[in-house]
Image (cartoon, rainbow, N blue to C red):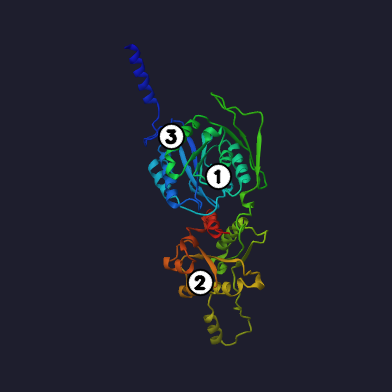
Amino acid sequence: METRLCLLASLIGLCVSAPDFHQNTTVCGPKPADIMFLLDSSSSIYILDYKKQLNFVNRLIDTFDIGRDKTRIGVSIFSFTYHPSIDLTTYDNKESLKRAVNQTRYLTGGTNTHIALSELRRSGFRNARPNVSRIAIVMTDGQSQDFKKTSDEAQRLKATGVKVFAVGIGKDVDMKELKAIGSDPSDTYVLLANDFNDLDTIYDRLAARACEVQDNKQTTTTLAPSTTTKSTSIATTKQTTTTTKPTNKKEIITSEPIMNDASTCGRNNMADIMFVFDSMAFGYTKTMYIYKFINEIIRYMSIDSGNIRVGLLSEICQNTDISINQFSDLTKLSDYITSYQTLSLASYIKQLRITSFEPTRGGRSDARRIAILFVEGRIENAQAVLMEAKRAKFQDIEIFVVSIGKTIAEENVNTICSSPATRHFVHIPSFEVLMSYRPTVIEQVCYGL
């Protein structure tokens, strides 16, 4: 009888102590962690499967004790480029966090995993806390565009002290690449699901292993950046059960800025790309914002190979000057000044259509013709603008609109932009945040190049 009671007590103890990951309750311990999800949003993932991926993330969120001084979670997505979606510091409660996850956009495009891993290392953990475990959970359904670059960037990320889980979904994943992405041992940090409907089968294991990492803090020392564009990090990762001690061997990771990888946009096809805006209408300060934005975008483009050619249309010269001896009649002088009109966006689109893609200006008959129009707020002389946009599109010019500030009317967007408008229109709230929308513009413009 005594033996039976002891056995019963043992079983009760097991039931109480073993976490039930199938219940939507917090089961991880009290130790905090900073966790970044990096989600594949490439064209190979059907939108309904993408939603299943988001649902899986929300199930995992329920595993952790979320709070400002507890576990914090961020989400980034990637396809051709990297898109930060939720910062580690944005949400301190599960309800708001899960709502934001459900609203994470669906991208489509290629699978540049190396770019995503590099940006995750550079900016994803920028608000991470010292002496708190940092965890990355990378989910993908296929192979990256470049195995070597992906492997190298994964190593750089892990060398900073981040523990990386690699989750492969479906039959097209590359096991060798997943092992290169995930931390060691692969038996712990690499997980496979047969398809998106099968994600629940790995939930228990991933949740349990992520919880275990919270108890294993790592110390990372980051050197101050030099005056060049390179950054240097020294990562120390040897652990004991009581404290974390650095190894004698220090690994120095050095990498060029991700923007120097100019082979991605235009790798497969040729395009002649024109950036168009009215610098007089924008004024000096706003024009400088746009110039800097364009300068960053073109760094992604395969210009050196010759596949991509870039032009700029920001001024249309008019002979509006008046010499001091030109008029001796007040009425004629007044009439001349009154007749002067500033040019609307229609004039820019017209010049774009007539001259910008001509062979004498470098245009090629076998290249895609792309125009990126920058506008601000309400469009003046809208009917003329819409008519010129229609004519341009009739001549096979693909038009993207970047609207800054107050958004333009939806019917104008649909008429000015190429179809579908959802892929050819970007609304940016202000010039001050223009640079943060760089990945979005690159993603849309470079799709298929």
Residue situated in front as seen by the camera: 49 or 214: 49
Distance Cα–Cα, label 3 vs label 1: 25 Å
- Count residues near mark 1 (Cα–Cα under 10 Å), then give few for <14, some for 14-19, many for 20+: many
Q: Position of residue 49 (x, y in %)?
A: 44, 48
Element type at marker 2?
helix
The residue wearing badge 3 is 204
Distance Cα–Cα, label 2 vs label 1: 38 Å
Left or right: 75 as drawn, with respect to 270:
left
Residue 253 lies in what quarter of the image? top right
Residue situated in front as seen by the camera: 31 or 207: 207
Give yes or no for contact between labels 2 and 3 (Cβ–Cβ under 8 Å): no
- Report the disc number at residue 389: 2
Looking at the rendered image, the disc whose residue lies closer to the viewer, 2 or 3, is 3
At 33% from the left edge and 15% from the top edge, which residue is drawn? 5
Q: Quadrant of the C terminus?
A: bottom right
Of callouts 3 and 1, the N-terminal one:
1
| Amino acid at circle 3 | Asp
Q: Position of residue 235 (x, y in %)?
A: 61, 35
The residue wearing badge 1 is 120
| Amino acid at circle 1 | Leu
